[in-house]
Amino acid sequence: MALVGIEELNTLVGEGRTLAGLDLGTKTIGLSVSDLSWRFASPRPVIRRVKFGIDAAALRKLLDEAECGGVIIGLPLNMDGSEGPRAQSTRAFVRNYTQLDARPIAFWDERLSTVAAERGMLEMDVSRAKRAERIDSAAASFILQGALDRLSALAARAEDESFE
């Protein structure tokens, strides 16, 4: 499997499998995993980036342990919707990772995800040190939750159309 549209995940990921959300940073990979019903995203510990082979092996191990059937990766678009160097780097990571793992991967616009995650942690009065440690996984949860909400809306719309 390779890169797919978000709409395709419902049919490609089997029952009893979770979805993972990723926020690819330069120093860490933020990770979040859904529940089995695809309603809630929960942050997991970050993966400290070393080099691609090591990063990919660590990621694959964590995805296997969480029984993930698909992955949502935040695509860091510029505010005007264009793609800059970070988006190109994310696409390169995905291109290389799909050679090692058959799980379907979908991109999700991650604009302002880190800002929203940090704002949420500030509202919870999380200390600066803990925010720095958890921000990438919180951003991954924000990305994954947005995708889960979209998948839920698509499923509800499909159900409504089947009753017509």
Image (cartoon, rainbow, N blue to C red):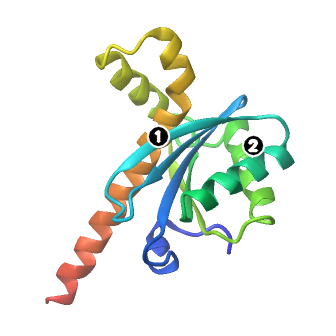
Q: Which three-letter amino acid code belongs to the residue tagged 2?
A: Ser
Taking the spot 82% from the left edge, 34% from the top edge, the residue there is: 50
Classify mark 2: residues with Cα within 10 Å, few (<14), some (14-19) or many (20+): some
Return the residue found at the far top: 128
Measured as percent of width and height from the top left, residue 146 is found at 38, 49
**Quadrant that contains the N terminus:** bottom right
Q: Which three-letter amino acid code belongs to the residue tagged 1?
A: Pro
13 in relation to 114, above or below: below
The residue to which callout 2 is attached is 89
Left or right of 17: which side holds 160?
left
Foreground residue among 145 and 163: 145
Taking the spot 55% from the left edge, 63% from the top edge, the residue there is: 68
Foreground residue among 38 and 79: 38
Sequence-first disc among 2 and 1: 1
Tell me the CA gap for discs 2 and 1.
Answer: 23 Å
The residue to which callout 1 is attached is 43
- Dot 2: what SS? helix
Return the residue found at the far left: 164
Foreground residue among 99 and 86: 99
**Quadrant that contains the C terminus:** bottom left
Measured as percent of width and height from the top left, residue 160 is found at 17, 80
